[in-house]
Image: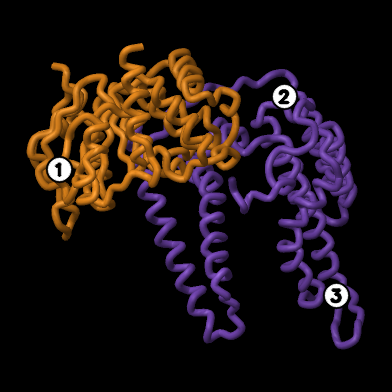
Chain colours: A purple, B orange
Amino acid sequence: MGGAHRPGLVGVAGDPSSAVHALDPRAKVVGLFAVTLIAVSASLEGWPVFVACAVMLAAVAAVARVSPATLWRRGLVILPLILLVAVFVPFLREGGRTWEIGFLTVSEAGLTTFGEVSAKAAIGTLAAVLLAATTSFPAVLRGLERLRMPRVLVLIASLMHRYLFVLADELLRMRASARARCYRPRSALRAGALGRITGAFLLRAHARGERVHRAMLARGYTGTMPHDEPLRLARADVAFVACVAGPLLALRLWTAVAS
Amino acid sequence: MSATIHARGLRYRYPGGRYALDGIDLTVNRGERVALLGPNGAGKTTFMLHLNGLLTGEGALEVAGLEVGKGVLHELRARVGLVFQDPDDQLFMPTIEEDVAFGPLNLGLDRTEVGLRVRDALAAVRMVNRAQRGPHELSMGERRRAAIATVLAMHPELLVLDEPSASLDPRSRRELVEILASFDQTMLVTTHDLPLAAQLCERAVVLSGGRVVADGPCDEVLADEATLAANDLELPLGFDLDRIVAYHRERRYA
């Protein structure tokens, strides 16, 4: 059992029997990706688009019974990293009016960019989190494969997902064994062991790769993954994409024409 | 021809190393269950990899009716099921069901047949209710059983298991032995777990330094303390070989 496998942060959440969970993975990938694209294409003057995207995602979450707490917890894993980059923009970018805050200068253009980036990042993250909460990872992969994503990329993603936990466990075990022998690096001089742990970890990962490949060959693998059963799009799947993407797209076009 | 494995003078040297297999002569008949014993570095795993054509050495090797060589690899791998020691090496698909289907799909079977084989293989290792799980959601014992199902689904003639009882708790180990005992394939089990060998196999072969140094009925080989000691093999303290022998006799005459 994976020690690195923290419950609550990965895997399907909400009500597994909901209408959203039951959809074809392709419908969810396309629908939620469309929301992200529409949000990314909008600007701050067309802010109603951002609001509409957020409302739409909230509606999908409500139907799937994914709680706001889950969305918040999972969003927190990704969002701060993106915002960390964006938070410097108001101070660095020039243009429009300026305000002085102590020794820092904030520009209007910078604030606008920051607002836009934050809104887009939040909506993109929310869409991704929703997809992950309503669709199992294997299903997402199958959906992507059916959407003509190159098979090699799907295979890489699938193996990464599979071995991430195995390798993370391995790393945790090595770290535990170092700690169990009182390893507490307090200075750069004592960090050498960390380098050796990293080296050993890379070698192990490589050896693991070779063993996995050997085990695949032993079962008749010839370099291409065998096909699995086809997915079928139902009326509900088309309806989902239309209902999610349609109104947002219309609003986006309307704001584009109006401005 | 009733021999499932027929090796004559099989030798193999890893690049830049000594001979890991140094003239193996071994015949395993159809339906036999053979324990392959020996200390670390005796050549057990190397021999095992030869049975599936993952390594090819000098000498003659015939497995499941095929002369092992480049031209027959695909057919050979369909007839020989290799279960590796670490199930994490063997299970690489997102779900157990897809992993069990991987081998049969590689054989080019149609969807219905693959579905049947997956169902039967999972049933044989009592894992039907775990089909949709990912390997990281399973216990070690369950992963080991799933790994066995992945090769069972290919309907192999010969089942080769590398240390099947390694890092299993007593209950998982007992369940595994029960499951393995229910199979009727020819079986070659590499192991340090001598009680497992005694319980599961009627014949034992001891490898040392890449050669066969003992070969005979399992209870006799395990009772031969001199051979065991010479090859760093030990029965656990307090282990009662006679009980196992009696158990086998009962089974044989049941």
Residue A79 in the image, given as x and y percentages of width and height: 75, 58
Q: Residue at x 19, y 47 (%)?
A: B226
The amino acid beneath tag 1 is Val
Q: Are marks 1 and 3 on the same chain?
A: no
Residue A29 is left or right of residue B26, and the answer is right
SS at mark 3 in the image: strand
Q: Which residue is mark 3?
A: A107
Chain under numbered label 3: A
Question: Which residue is under mark 1?
Answer: B213
Q: In this view of the protein, can residue A205 be seen by the observer?
A: yes
Q: Residues within 10 Å of mark 1 (few under 14, many from 20)?
A: some
Quarter of the image that includes the N terminus of chain B: top left
- Identify the chain of the residue marked 2, using the numbered disc in the image: A
Q: Which residue is mark 2?
A: A238
Of residue A201 and residue B224, the one placed in the foreground of this image is B224
Would you identify the image quadrant in which residue A169 lies? bottom right
Q: Taking A194 as reference, is B11 above or below it? A: above
Mark 3 is on which residue type?
A: Ser
Note whether A233 is above or below B18 in the view shown: above
User: For residue B188, which quarter of the picture?
Assistant: top left
Specify few, some or many for label 3: CA neighbours under 10 Å numbering under 14, 14-19, or 20 or more.
many
